[in-house]
Amino acid sequence: MSVDLAGKVAVVTGAGQGLGLAYALALARSGAAVVVNDVDEAAAEQAVRSITEEGGNAVSEVAAVGTAETAERLVTRAVEAFGKLDVLVTNAGILRDRVLWKMSDEDFDAVVGVHLRGTFTCARAAAIRMREQGEGGTLILVGSPAGQRGNFGQTNYAAAKAGIAAMARTWSMELAKARITVNAIVPVAATAMTETIPAFAPYVEAQRRGEPFPDFLRKAEGFGTAGDCAALVPFLASEAAREITGQCIGIGGDKLALWSHPHEASVAYADGGWTPDTIAAAWPTSVGREPQTVGIPAPVIPASAVPATPDPGASVPGPDTPGPAASVPGPVAPGPAVSGA
C-alpha cells in the first residue's frame, strides 16, 4: 500500500528541531497538515516555513508540554486550523542526566513532567477528540533504547521512556474499539541528545564536515541522521499500518527493528512453594543461570573506521558517566526542551 496522508491532520510536539522536525517534515511530505509545537518560537516558525516552502501546510503552537492546558491548546489549534485531529506524535523531551546520588528532585520531576506526563496529557486530549470524531486515529509515542534497557546516569529519562512503552501497550487495548492505534517508536539518531555520547561524537563531527556515517554505524548500531528515523512516522499514520498497534518499533540509520515485550526468560517450580533457602539453592542452576543484561550495549567500532580527525575532547567521559565504553550522554544543565530520543 502507498503511504498517502492527504486530508490527515497531525500534531508533533517538540518539532522545532532534530527528530521532531524530521517527523513533521515527513508527515507534511506525505500530505498531512501539521501543527508544529515547540517551546522555542523562532524554531517553531522556521519549521513551519520549511514545510510551507515545500508546498506543505503547517501552523505553529508555542508551548511547553506537560500540562493539561497545553495539551488542550494543541488539540484546539489543530481543529481550528484544519478542522480535526488524526495523528499525534509525542516527541518533546529534555535531559537532566545525573547519577542517582546526585540527582535532585527537580532533575527528576522536570524530565518525568515533560516526557511521561507530557505524553499522558497530550495523548489523553487527542484520544478524547479522536473518539468524538469517530473516525479512528493514530498515537505515536516516542520512546528510547534507555527505556528498553536502562542507561547509566538516566534514572529520570529511562524511567519516563519505560513508562511510555507501557502506556503504548495499555492504550492500544483501551482505544482499540475506537480504531485508534497506539505505538511507541524507539529512534536512534545524531541529535542534541546523542551527539555527546563519546563513542558517537567523532562520527557526528565528521558528518557535520560532510562525511557520511560509515556502513557499520548505520547497520550494526542503527545510528544515522534524524531524517533516517522519519519514515516510520508517516507509515504508522497511514492506512498501511491500520492493524499495527501496541508495538515498540526501533529505527535508525539503515535499521528497522521490533522490540520484544518483557517476558519471563526462565522459570522454576517448587512443590508447595519457595523458601529463602530453596531459592538460594536453586537460583544458580535454574532461573539465575543466564541473568539478563542491563544498559545500552557500547558500540563495537572497528579500528579502521575511526574518523581521521576526531574531536580531541569527544572521548572524555563526563563526571557522572562510566568509563570509555559507556554509551550515555554526560550531564546536561537545565535548559529548554529539546527534540530527540
Image (spheres, rainbow, N blue to C red):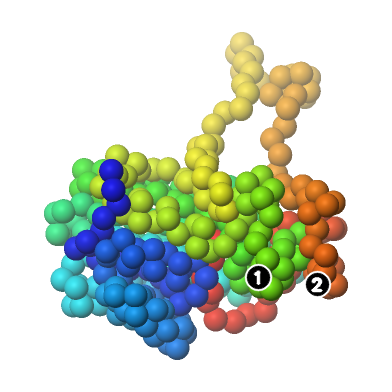
In the rendered structure, which amino acid carries the disc numbered 1?
Answer: Gly
Q: Please, is residue 329 above or below residue 145 in the view?
A: below
Sequence-wise, which precedes: disc 1 or disc 2?
Answer: 1
Apparent side of residue 315 relative to residue 290 in the rendered image (left or right): right
Q: Residue furthest bottom?
A: 42
Q: Could one spot residue 229 in this view of the protein?
A: yes
Disc sitting over residue 104 in the figure: none
Instruction: Provide residue 335's location: percent of width, then percent of height.
Output: 59, 82
Q: In the rendered image, which residue does mark 1 sit on?
A: 210
x, y percent for residue 127? 26, 58
Question: In the depicted view, which residue is nearer to us: 30 or 186?
Answer: 30
Residue 273 x/y as whole percent? 61, 18
Q: Mark 1 near mark 2, Cβ–Cβ under 8 Å?
A: no
Image quadrant occupied by the C terminus: bottom right
Measuring 29% from the left and 73% from the top, which residue is drawn there?
56
Residue at 64% x, 18% y is 268
> As drawn, is 293 to the left or to the right of 158?
right
* Left or right: 91, with 253 as reference point: left
Q: Residues within 10 Å of mark 1 (few under 14, many from 20)?
A: few
Are there few (<14), some (14-19), or many (20+) residues within 10 Å of tag 2? some
Horizontally, residue 140 falls left or right of residue 92, namely left
The extreme top residue here reads 271
For the point 57% across and 53% down, the residue is 253
Q: Residue 311: which disc?
A: 2
Task: Inspect the image, locate mark 2, and give the three-letter code of the amino acid beneath it.
Answer: Asp
